[in-house]
Amino acid sequence: MNRRILFIFIFLGIYCNSFSQKSPNWGIWNQLTGSWVGEGNGKPGQGEGECSFTFDLDKNILVRKNHTVISAIKDKKEVIHDDLMIIYADSLGLTNRAIYFDNESHVINYSIINSDTTIILTSEIRLGLPQFRLTYSFVNKETLTSKFEISLNSKDFFTYIEGTSKKKL
C-alpha cells in the first residue's frame, strides 16, 4: 500500500513538472532595466519623455512604462502620450512576446527577435490594419536608440518616430 502511494506521488510530481513553464531567459533585456530619459529638448513640436523597464511577478515579466510630452506648436496643442508594455516568455522560457497598451486605446501584440545589441518587436499582421515595428539598439550601456515604424502592406516600413535615450543613474 505504501509503495502505491509513493508511486502515485512520484507520478504526479513528474506529470505536473512536465507541464510547467520554464523561467524566462532575459538576456539582452537585462540591459534595459532601469529608467531612461529621451534626449528631446521640449522645443515646440518636439518631444521629451521618460521610460522605465522593471521586472515584476518574481522576474517572470518585464514592464515598460513610457511617458512622452510633445510640446505645442502653432495651432497644435501639447500632446501627452502614456503607454505600458508587458514583455513575457513563452512556455520554453523565450522572451519573444509582448503586449502594448496606451492612453489612445491602442493594443498591440508583438513578437520579438533580438541579437546582442538590438531588440526588434513586430506586431502581428491583421487584415486591414497597419503593422508596427519597434526597434531598440544599444549604442553603449548608457545610450539607447529607438525607432517606431509603420507598414501599410506588411513589407515596406516607414519611420514614424525615432530618438535616443540616456540611462538615468
Image (spheres, rainbow, N blue to C red):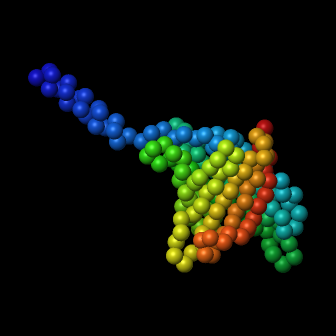
Quarter of the image where one finds residue 121: bottom right
Which residue is at 64% across, 40% downward? 30
- Residue at the far top in the pictured view: 2
What is the x, y in percent for residue 143?
Answer: 79, 46
Screen quadrant of the N terminus: top left
Which residue is at 86% across, 72% downward? 73
Quarter of the image where one finds residue 59: top right
What is the x, y in percent for residue 16?
Answer: 31, 38
Count of picture labels: 0
State the residue in front, 69 or 112: 112
State the residue in front, 22 or 156: 156
State the residue in front, 28 or 36: 28
Which residue is at 73% across, 67% downward? 159
Which residue is at 74% across, 47% downward? 138
What is the x, y in percent for residue 54?
Answer: 63, 43
Q: Is residue 7 left or right of residue 111?
A: left
Q: Is residue 116 left or right of residue 98?
A: right
Screen quadrant of the C terminus: top right
What is the x, y in percent for residue 60?
Answer: 52, 41
Is residue 168 visible from the viewing direction of this image? no
Is residue 48 visible from the viewing direction of this image? yes
Q: Is residue 105 left or right of residue 139?
A: left
